[in-house]
Image: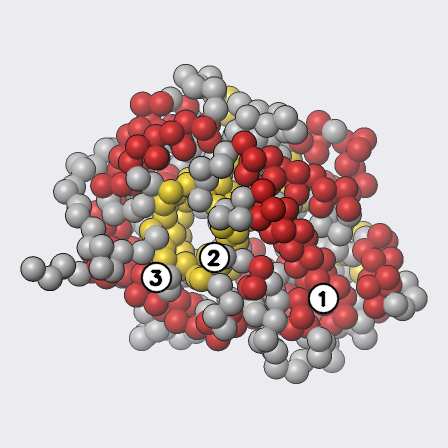
Amino acid sequence: MNLKKYLWALAAVSVIGTTACSDDDKFDPFAEAPEPPLPVYTPNEATVKPKGMWIDCHANFLRLATKENIDKELAKIKQYGMNLIYLDVKPGNGYALYKSEILPYCNTFADLTVERDYDDYLGYFLEKSEELGIDVVASIGAMGWGMQSPTYKQGYVYDNWNQWKGKVQVRSDKNDPNLLVPIDQDVDRVEGYREAQSVTMMDPMYPEVQDLLVSVATEIVTKYPKIKGISLDYLRYANNEGGWFGMSDDNMRGYAEYWGEAVPNHLEIVTETGGVGPKFAKWLEFRAMTVTNLLKRIRESVKAINPDCEIHLWAGADWQNRYAVGQNWASKRYTPPTSGIYTPTYNKTGFADLLDVFVTGAYAEVVWKKGSTTDWNVENFVTTWDNYIMGDCKCYGSIAAYAYGNDVKAQSDATYLCLKHTDGYMNFELSHVNNFNLWTATLDGIQRYEGVPEE
């Protein structure tokens, strides 16, 4: 069976809206946005749910360099109906926005450098958030350890290149599966923060990479016991329509160990014509289990330090394309339909039971099912997630504010649907809400769900 066009199309689609930390080129995230008036908001305690704002490192890098601006943004978040933030504290460059003994402190990101009037980004956010009654979930860009563009390479992996150069993710070329391309040499790839920049992702298969990530997660939980949880972003393989990541020779040996077979050649995974090879499905299971086992290690290590610290994970809401990046966020009890993609045992790679909260990325421009010609709409995503999770963990619906531009009705509707059909809400992301002035629309969606308390 040759599924070349189908598979590469899905791979391309899943780049869009697969990372909670992605940026959009419709506007300038670094522009100064007008300040909206603060409303008077009284939550209905009978219906209140967790409602979070994602705060991306790069897009807010300049704006949040002062205590004054952090105070201002947190006040808006609180007054416009939210009680939770997802704070990017280990972004894709591999630096730390907290006091780390493992990673360098992040004063520079890409072409931006800041001088802050405080010495601990996460620490100050926690201090101010506690005053306002806002919970903080610390977000880690799990596999992202550097940034690359046509003009520079920057970040932890490049600062320590001799140690880590053999541990970055490697893809095959769709036109020649025997041609292997390390991600740091993949100059045409765009996935991440801004156009022409991409995240350099390390391979989760390597024990050294796993140890590094676990040490960062446990350091955060140890140093900051007041955080509500740890959120894992980029806990996956990279994606590119130019080829499949996880195709290095070391991955082939890992496949052989996992299945107890001889080391396969690349053409047994993907054929010369780009089709599905005889070992493609088994290779997908091997990759997915690699990610799941790493998540299990992180969970066990974090819970050993603080059993109350929640484990969150963001991923694209369309489960059917997550095989492309090695993420099976379903329950182990969910068995996918028989196909050339899934083995009969693929279900055991499901990791919903390892999460406290799955944040489903319903990043669709179309909000309602009615009038939609595809399943790619917010309403579909926030009403079908438990078909896969099957009650194993909570689910928060998340939306991409940039998808709606200045369409305040769409922002309100999408917010309302997330709260109505899931256990909570996440709005991606602060700079988009600021620049498109979507605060009032967000609050409107929240209040529509919460209703008016009975007298």
Q: Which residue is mark 2?
A: 357
**Dots 3 and 1: beta carbons under 8 Å?**
no
Q: Nearer the viewer, mark 2 or mark 1?
A: 2
- Residue 154 horizontal side relative to residue 422, left or right: right
Chosen colour scheme: secondary structure
The extreme right residue here reads 262
Label 3 to label 2: alpha-carbon separation: 14 Å
Whole-percent x, y for residue 336 in the image: 61, 78
Residue at 25 percent across and 47 percent down: it is 81
- Residue 421 horizontal side relative to residue 334, left or right: left
Whole-percent x, y for residue 10 in the image: 59, 66
**Dots 3 and 2: beta carbons under 8 Å?**
no
Q: Amino acid at mark 3?
A: Cys
The extreme bottom residue here reads 338
Mark number displayed over residue 119: none
Q: Nearer the viewer, residue 428 or 348?
A: 348
> Where 414 sits versus 149, above or below?
below
Whole-percent x, y for residue 273 in the image: 78, 69
Residue at 76 percent across and 60 percent down: it is 175
Quarter in which the N terminus is drawn: bottom right
Disc 2 element: strand
Residue at 31 percent across and 61 percent down: it is 419
> Where 272 sits versus 55, above or below?
below
Q: Earlier in the sequence, mark 3 or mark 2?
A: 2
Q: Nearer the viewer, residue 423 or 152?
A: 423
Q: Amino acid at mark 2?
A: Val
Whole-percent x, y for residue 94 in the image: 62, 35
Q: Amino acid at mark 1?
A: Leu
Quarter in which the C terminus is drawn: bottom left
Packing grade of label 2 (10 A; few <14, some 14-19, many >=20) is many
Q: Which residue is mark 1?
A: 284
Q: Which residue is mark 3?
A: 418
